[in-house]
């Protein structure tokens, strides 16, 4: 009996010696733990694994600190004390996201921690205290993706942007007062030598404060008024490849503004391939629909390379588009939406897909619970060969699945910073041009 037990123990020791996970090469261990990065539900698991044994600690800790996202000042303080106490943790941080209310209580903690974060390439700092942004002026990291936001725009914004010459995507999300403050203007020509994508929430930062034609390819504007849009198209039109705009329709807009393509009239966007326009209305504003203003002047010459066009609207506008057209200009069996699609396919020679949508409330059951969420519902138009089908386009109606530029080109839901590849948020790649070929799909 004793001999049998000894044989079993010897077999187990041999198995542990030759096949145990601890004997895996360091590269394989790193790959295993990297699978749990950016998953909030796995953070506690990684923290527990880091305390199992010393062999697991380096890789588990590196995975735990590679993506850091914090939404409370107390969490920021704990993180800063952690990396100051053990600086090797600071070297692991690649993505740092801080989005807190206030922020004055974390200034000293960040002041001690930021000089240690030498490898950060993606930074999101959304705070209400504008003094915290000045800490970035002496930061050692070289960012590729930068998101700044909060209640007030800092006066040193241009100097902060100048301190990051390698940044490829910038998002400004200031929503407080003082949007016209002259100290926040961006006009230096030496800024953004490598900038590829720019996103601005014009609620607290007017786009007219940007006064230099930086050669960006991708632009996103949130709650943009007519002046912001006109200024952006005039400034960046020659280089834009994709454009995402959430328009704010107020009393200053005319009936021509009802049609989103009116912003392209007499403009020059020779490289523009993808446009995603969403309209939000002032509660007291309701634009009159004039079907004769569908086709603006010079649309074909303005966007000769436009391939996909999407237009989001509220339910009131969608109902206007679903009624039959009146008068002698269009057929009585054609809806306003069909007529608009007909005009756009005739104006834009490269247009292949067009989508009109509104958001609808959907209820689904998940894990025995009913969940209510919004999904885009509308109509998709796809160009057809008139000689074969007898019509210039084919229309399909239903729930549109993940077809908007906001979800494909910008990392966060809704308004956010651009992405690097299929999963990263730091720069742009050819992956998006492949994805956008099929962004208009119907469930």
Image (spheres, rainbow, N blue to C red):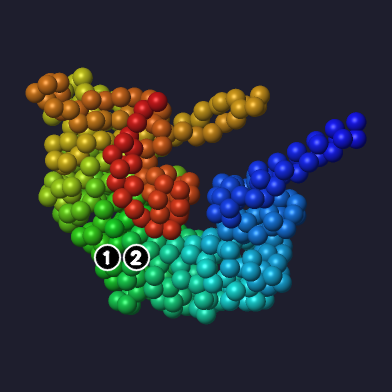
Callout 1 secondary element: loop
Q: Residue furthest front?
A: 3
- 294 lies left or right of 411: left
Q: Residues within 10 Å of mark 1 (few under 14, many from 20)?
A: some
Q: Residue at x 42, y 53 (%)?
A: 419
The answer to whether one can see residue 92 in this image is yes
Position in image of residue 143 (x %, y %): 46, 67
Position in image of residue 275 (x %, y %): 29, 46
Q: How many marks?
A: 2
Q: Residue at x 20, y 60 (%)?
A: 238
Residue nearest the viewer, comparing 27 with 85 = 27
Q: Residue at x 13, y 46 (%)?
A: 300
Q: Residue at x 40, y 76 (%)?
A: 162
* Mark positioned earlier in the residue sequence (2 or 1): 2
Could you say which quadrant of the image residue 268 lies in?
bottom left
Q: Name above or below for residue 234 compared with residue 305.
A: below
Residue nearest the viewer, comparing 15 with 32 = 15
Position in image of residue 288 (x %, y %): 29, 39
Q: Which residue is mark 1?
A: 215
Q: Which residue is mark 2?
A: 195
């Amino acid at each position: 009996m004793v001999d049998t037990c000894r044989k079993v123990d010897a077999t187990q020791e041999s198995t542990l010696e030759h096949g145990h996970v601890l004997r895996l090469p360091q590269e394989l261990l790193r790959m295993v733990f990297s699978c749990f990065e950016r998953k909030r539900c796995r953070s506690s698991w990684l923290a527990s694994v880091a305390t199992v044994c010393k062999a697991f600690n380096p890789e588990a800790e590196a995975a735990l600190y590679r993506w850091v996202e914090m939404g409370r000042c107390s969490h920021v303080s704990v993180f800063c004390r952690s990396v100051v106490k053990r600086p090797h943790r600071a070297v692991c941080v690649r993505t740092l996201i801080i989005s807190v209310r206030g922020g004055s209580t974390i200034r000293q903690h960040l002041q001690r921690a930021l000089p240690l974060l030498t490898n950060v390439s993606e930074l999101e700092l959304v705070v209400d205290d504008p003094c915290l942004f000045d800490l970035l002026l002496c930061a050692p990291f070289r960012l590729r993706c930068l998101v700044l936001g909060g209640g007030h725009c800092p006066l040193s914004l241009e100097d902060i942007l100048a301190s990051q010459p390698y940044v490829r995507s910038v998002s400004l999300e200031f929503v407080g007062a003082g949007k016209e403050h002259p100290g926040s203007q961006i006009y230096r020509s030496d800024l953004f030598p490598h900038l590829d994508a720019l996103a601005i929430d014009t609620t607290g930062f007017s786009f007219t404060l940007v006064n230099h034609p930086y050669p960006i390819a991708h632009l996103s504007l949130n709650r943009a008024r007519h002046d912001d849009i006109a200024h952006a198209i005039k400034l960046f039109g020659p280089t834009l490849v994709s454009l995402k705009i959430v328009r704010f329709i107020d009393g200053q807009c005319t009936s021509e503004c009802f049609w989103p393509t009116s912003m392209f009239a007499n403009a020059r966007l020779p490289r523009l391939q993808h446009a995603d326009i969403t309209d939000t209305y002032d509660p007291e504003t309701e634009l009159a629909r004039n079907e004769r203003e569908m086709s603006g002047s010079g649309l074909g010459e303005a966007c000769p390379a436009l391939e996909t066009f999407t237009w989001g609207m509220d339910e009131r506008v969608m109902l206007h588009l679903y009624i039959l057209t009146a008068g002698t200009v269009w057929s009585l069996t054609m809806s306003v939406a069909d007529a608009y699609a007909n005009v756009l396919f005739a104006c834009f020679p490269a247009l292949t897909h067009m989508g009109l949508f509104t958001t609808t409330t959907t209820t689904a059951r998940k894990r025995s619970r009913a969940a209510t969420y919004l999904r885009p519902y509308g109509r998709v138009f796809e160009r057809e060969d008139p000689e074969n089908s007898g019509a210039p386009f084919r229309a399909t109606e239903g729930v549109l699945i993940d077809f908007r530029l906001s979800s494909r080109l910008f990392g966060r839901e809704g308004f956010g910073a651009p992405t690097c590849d299929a999963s990263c948020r730091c720069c742009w790649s050819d992956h998006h041009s492949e994805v956008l070929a099929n962004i208009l799909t119907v469930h």
